[in-house]
Image: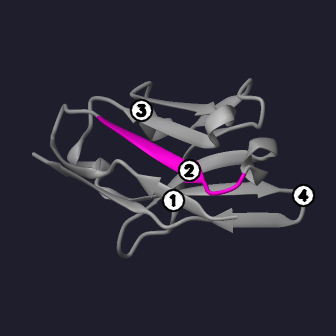
Amino acid sequence: VQLQASGGGLVQAGGSLRLSCVDSGSTVRAMTVAWQRQTPGKQRELVASITATGVNTRYADFVEGRFTISRENAKNTVFLEMNSLKPEDTAVYLCVAYGPGVLYTGQGTQVTVSS
């Protein structure tokens, strides 16, 4: 399994970005996928997660309704739509796929929000 995150960039506060996480194969279709973020000196934290069918989603409290996670299994892709971005959202965003006894972590994409 190779997970590749993309869509990050530099955006002003209040702006939007759409992140994509693509699986090179199709294994992730049957797995829960999460977006996590990492900033220097801080523990990696969960941003959002979505189950294999897409029925159940979960968000960190700091999201406050600003982000939406979704997936298109036919394209082996999970998205994170981020709106009303804040400078404190600046981080490397990574996608993680997990299931019973397995965990796959992809390379991240940098999101920088300027004030």
Residue 40 location (% of width, % of height): 35, 74
Q: Are marks 1 and 4 in contact (CB under 8 Å)?
A: no
Which amino acid lies under the numbered mark 4 shown in the image of this protein?
Pro
Disc 1 and disc 2: Cα gap in Å?
Answer: 5 Å
Q: Find numbered disc 2 in the image and state the secondary structure of the residue it sits on.
A: strand
Q: Main secondary structure of the magenta part?
A: strand
Q: Secondary structure at mark 1?
A: strand
What quarter of the picture does the N terminus occupy?
Answer: bottom right
Numbered circle sitting on residue 17: none
Q: What residue is drawn where x is 53% and y is 49%?
A: 21
Q: Earlier in the sequence, mark 4 or mark 3?
A: 3
Q: Is residue 114 magenta?
A: no
Q: Amino acid at mark 2?
A: Val
Residue that label 4 marks = 100
Q: Which residues are magenta?
A: 17-25
Q: Residues under labels 3 and 2: Cα distance?
A: 15 Å
* Mark 4, secondary structure of its residue: loop
| Residue sitting at x 20%, y 33% | 15
Which label's residue is closer to the chain start, 3 or 2?
2
**In the picture, residue 110 is in which quadrant?**
bottom left
Q: Amino acid at mark 1?
A: Gln
Q: Amino acid at mark 3?
A: Glu
Q: Are marks 1 and 2 in contact (CB under 8 Å)?
A: yes
